[in-house]
Image (spheres, grey):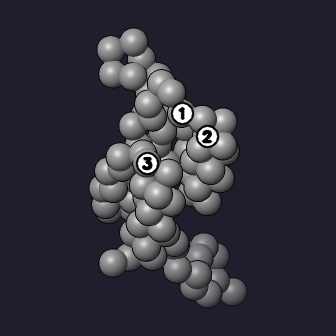
Amino acid sequence: MPASGSRAAAIAARLSAIGLPTRVEEHDRYTSIEAEVPEALSAGSWRKALEAVAEADRFGLLATSVNGRTLWAVVHEAVPATGDVGGPSHQR
């Protein structure tokens, strides 16, 4: 499992621990996490959910009248550091 997948799995586990059903999906350059948020979520649970997604690289809340509320987060793959970041034209 890539590093992004491990971080995403940890975030998903924290969201699941507070009772939010989660989905984790791996992509080429990132891993996404989505959790359905019920209408009656306590303030304490909201705090824990926000603390969990704050560990991601990006997060947000999608709320619609049709599909309810979905808390989402994205964890990007780490880009390996190299001595040739600028490419051949930048070498001296």
Q: Do the residues labelled 3 and 2 touch (CB within 8 Å)?
A: no
Tell me where residue 76 appears, x and y as whole percent.
49, 61
> Gap in Å between the C-alphas at discs 1 and 2?
7 Å
Q: Which residue is drawn at 69% across and 86% down?
A: 92
Residue of label 1: 41
Q: Which residue is drawn at 30% across and 55% down?
A: 25
Q: What residue type is labelled 2?
A: Trp
Sequence-wise first label, 3 or 2: 3
Compared to 54, does 85 lie above or below? below
**Nearest the camera: 11 or 28?**
11
Q: What residue type is labelled 1?
A: Leu
Q: Which amino acid does label 3 sit on?
A: Gly
> Looking at the image, is mark 3 or mark 2 nearer the viewer?
3
Q: Do the residues labelled 1 and 3 touch (CB within 8 Å)?
A: no
**Nearest the camera: 77 or 38?**
38
Residue of label 3: 19
